[in-house]
Image (cartoon, helix red, strand yellow):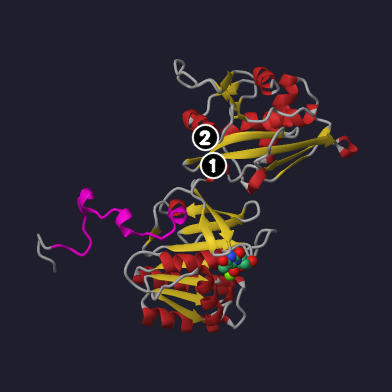
Amino acid sequence: MKKIGERPHGHPRPLASIETKEALRLDSGLAEFNRVLGGGVMKGSVALLAGEPGIGKSTLMLQLAAGIGGAGRVLYISGEESPAQIRLRADRLGLRSSRIEVFSETELSAILRVCESVKPIVVILDSIQTVYSEDIGSVPGTVNQIKLCTQELIDWAKSHGAALFLVGHVTKEGYIAGPKVVEHMVDTVLYFDSGSAEIRILHCAKNRFGSVDEIGIFEMGEQGLRQVDNPASVFLSHRTGEQPPGVAVAPVYEGSRILLVEIQSLVVPAKGGISRVFSERIDSARVSRVAAVLEKHLKVRLSDQDIYVNVGGGMRIGEVGIDLPLCLSLYSARINQPIPAKTAVVGEISLAGEVRPVGHLDRRIKAVQEMGFSRLISPHPKEQKAQLPELCSPVSSLAEAARAGFQP
Ligand code: TYD
Ligand code: MG
C-alpha cells in the first residue's frame, strides 16, 4: 500500500508546469507544411496524406523525410517503389540525408519488425493500400486489411512516440474502400490537391492538434515541390487589358492569409426551361441564394438560366466575403458586360440585398493594393469612423454595388 505523501503513478500537476504542445512538435523543414499542421509535426501523432495518384504525395513525403528536424532516424517504407527508385527521386530532388532509411515491404509483421529495430522518430508508409497482414489473407487494399494494418501501425507509433505518416491514394470520384475508412483512427487528415497546372494545395480535413483552416501552397517543378512564399496572386490569371464578362476578382481570407482569386460565371438559357447550378468550388446552395438575391434586387432574370461557376486556380472557397464578387460575376455574365480591369470586389450580402461588412477589410485592401489593383468595391467598414483609402468604393446595397461595378 502507498503511504500518504508518496506520489502515486498518476497525479494532477499544476497547469503551468505541463510541457506545451509546441515543445512536442518537430519542424517539418517545410514552412507551408508546418502551417497546415498548426506549427509542425506532433511527436507520436498519426497523419493520413490523401491525394490522387501522381499529385506528388511521395515527393512531398521524401522532402519531409529529408528536412524534418529533431534527432533520430527517419524510416521511409514503400510498397510501391524499389529503394533504387526512391534513391533516384532523392537525387533528382537534390536531397542528401543520411538519416533516411529506406525499406520496400508490404507485409505488416516485417514492417513492424523493422520499425522495432530502427526505432525511427518518423515513419512514412507509402502507401497504406499496399500493406497487408498475413493474419487476414494476402490481398492488400481491402477495407479489413487497411483498418487492421493502420491500427497496428498506430499502436506501434503511439507507444514509441514516433510520428507516423500514412499515404493514401484517392481518385476523383471520391474514395470508397480506400483510406476514408481510417480517417476516424488517425489524428490528422491531410489532402493534397492540384490547383492550376503546377500548383499543389495541401489542406487539413481533420486535426486533433490545431485548426483546419490553414492551407499550404506548393509548386511542382523539376526539383520537386517548392513552397510558394507569396501566394496572394498565384490563383490569378494575370490578364492584360479588359477582362471578359463574368469575371470578378476577390480578396478572400483563407486560413490566416489573403489570397486573390478569380470567380468566373457563365449564364446560358436553361435547357428544358429548368435552371440548374453547376459549381464545384463554391457551394451550389450559396450560388443559388446569391442568384435569387440578384434576381430580386437587380431585376435580372436568372431562373430560366443554367449557371456555371468556377474559381480560377482550383481553390475551394467557403468564406462569406465571396458573396458580393460572386453576385457581380453572375450579373456581369448575365448582362454580358465586363467588370472593369483592375477592379476587385468583396462583401457579404443579405437576403434583403444589403452589403454586409467583412472581417479583415484592412488586410484585404492592402493585398489588393499590393497586387496593383486600382479599385476595391467593398462594404463600409465595421467601425463607422474608420477611413478607407481612395481605392475603395464602399457600397451598402446591391444596387449601389452594381452601379459601382460597371463604371470604368
Ligand atoms: P509523385 O510524388 O510520385 O506522386 P504520388 O506519390 O502522389 O503518386 O509525383 C508524381 C509526379 O510529379 C510525376 O508526374 C512527376 C512529377 N514530378 C515533378 O514534376 N518533379 C519532381 O521533382 C518529381 C520528383 C516529380
Ligand atoms: Mg507515390
Q: Residue at x 83, y 36 (%)?
A: 268
Q: Which mark is residue 232?
A: 1
Name the quadrant of the C terminus.
Answer: top right
Numbered range of the magenta stretch:
7-34
Q: Residue at x 60, y 22 (%)?
A: 355
Q: Along the polypeptide, which appears first: circle 2 or circle 1? A: 1
Would you say residue 192 is visible in this rendering?
A: yes
**Amino acid at pointer 1:** Ala
Would you say residue 168 is visible in this rendering?
A: no
Q: Which mark is residue 370?
A: 2
Q: Is residue 345 left or right of residue 364?
A: right
Residue sitting at the far front = 240
Q: Quadrant of ligand 2?
A: bottom right
Where is residue 257 shown, x and y percent of the image?
A: 49, 41
Q: Is residue 377 left or right of residue 308?
A: left
Instruction: Relative to 173, say whether 115 is above or below.
Output: below
Instruction: Relative to 93, say whether 325 is above or below.
Output: above
Q: Pick whichever, 258 or 206, lies toward us.
A: 258
Q: Pick whichever, 217 or 202, lies toward us.
A: 217
Q: Is residue 8 magenta?
A: yes
Where is residue 66 shown, x and y percent of the image?
A: 43, 68
From the image, state whether disc 2 or disc 1 is nearer to you.
2
Check if mark 2's residue and mark 1's residue have beta carbons within 8 Å. Answer: yes
Where is residue 353 shown, x and y percent of the image?
A: 65, 21
**Amino acid at pointer 2:** Glu
